[in-house]
Amino acid sequence: MRRAWDGLWVRLLPKRLVTAAVGMLAATPQSRALIPWFVRHYGIDVDEAELPLPAYRSWAEFFSRRLRPGARVVASCGVASPVDGRASCCGRLEEETMVQAKGRLYRLSELVVQDDCAAWFRGGHYLTLYLSPRDYHRVHAPLDGTVTRWTYVPGTLYPVNAAGVSSVRGLFAKNERLVIELNTPFGLCALVLVGATIVGSIRTAFGPAPQNPFRRRAGGIQSDRVSIPVRRGEELGYFAFGSTVICLFPPGWPLQFQVAEGDPVRMGQCVASLPFTPATRLGREGKR
């Protein structure tokens, strides 16, 4: 009964209207009055914020806040978590199949869209990280490397909370998303930034320009080859509001996950070890 109700309200919610309305409200100076309530309600550690609370000009500006210097230590080896959040799913792809939630599966090719990208990661590993409203919402590079391509896929804006992922089949492959391909010393990996209800946009310095939620589908799928060097822990972009990041790794990487499903994670912590060096990388991990 609960699952049926969750599925009903998730589908009936006017997702773009809610997203546009909340986005407009959150950007106003008057929305600053919501920040103290938001901090108390979600138990946010404001000592980690880059600025004192009175310095934020709007609720949206506080939500996408940066961390103060030294608030995180970035792991020097293995895969560093790109975000604060919670590990909701992790494991090996059964060829094309990934787990969204218990009883819910979806396909890699539908998530990343690009055929060569899907072929590269088929049979590899994935880690899904959910960002709740209380979390820090900027996304960072998990390894040293070069951003080689981004692909923006327009879609719907289902909520990515427990109600959404348990009731909407293939939710991550239906929501709008940005696929970032990163060529590292070990080979190619990818981050999929998934939008959701109330997410004003997914913003990066190299991807598409932010648009009104009602206009995002008009441009269709967008993609571009780039060459942007990044260091592990360097910022790649941010969500205007909360969502999900899916990390993809190719089958040749002998990953050993250091987190289990349900574990909280913090940006910079080692979420997977890599028991080999760039000099011994295997097979398909080389430059594409």
Image (tube, helix red, strand yellow):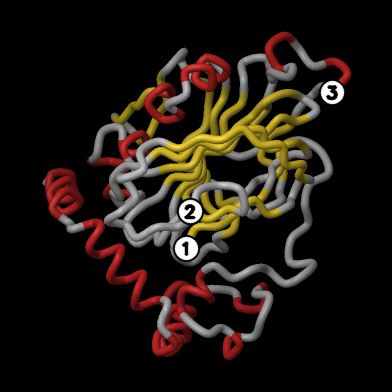
> Residue 8 has which mark?
none
Which amino acid, by three-letter code, is at mark 1? Answer: Ala
> Residue 278 has which mark?
3
Which element carries disc 1, helix, strand or loop? Answer: loop
Which amino acid, by three-letter code, is at mark 2? Answer: Ile
Residue receiving disc 1? 240
The reply to whether callout 1 and callout 3 are in contact (CB within 8 Å) is no
Which element carries disc 2, helix, strand or loop? Answer: strand
At 45% from the left and 57% from the top, the residue drawn is: 210
- x then y, percent, for residue 96: 43, 17
| 70 vs 256, nearest the viewer | 70
- x then y, percent, for residue 50: 68, 75
Q: Tell me if residue 265 can be seen.
A: yes
Of callouts 2 and 3, the N-terminal one: 2
Residue 222 sits in quarter: top left
Q: Residue furthest front?
A: 219
Residue receiving disc 2? 202
- x then y, percent, for residue 196: 36, 52
* Vertical placement of residue 95 versus 79, above or below: above
The reply to whether callout 2 and callout 1 are in contact (CB within 8 Å) is yes
Which amino acid, by three-letter code, is at mark 3? Answer: Pro
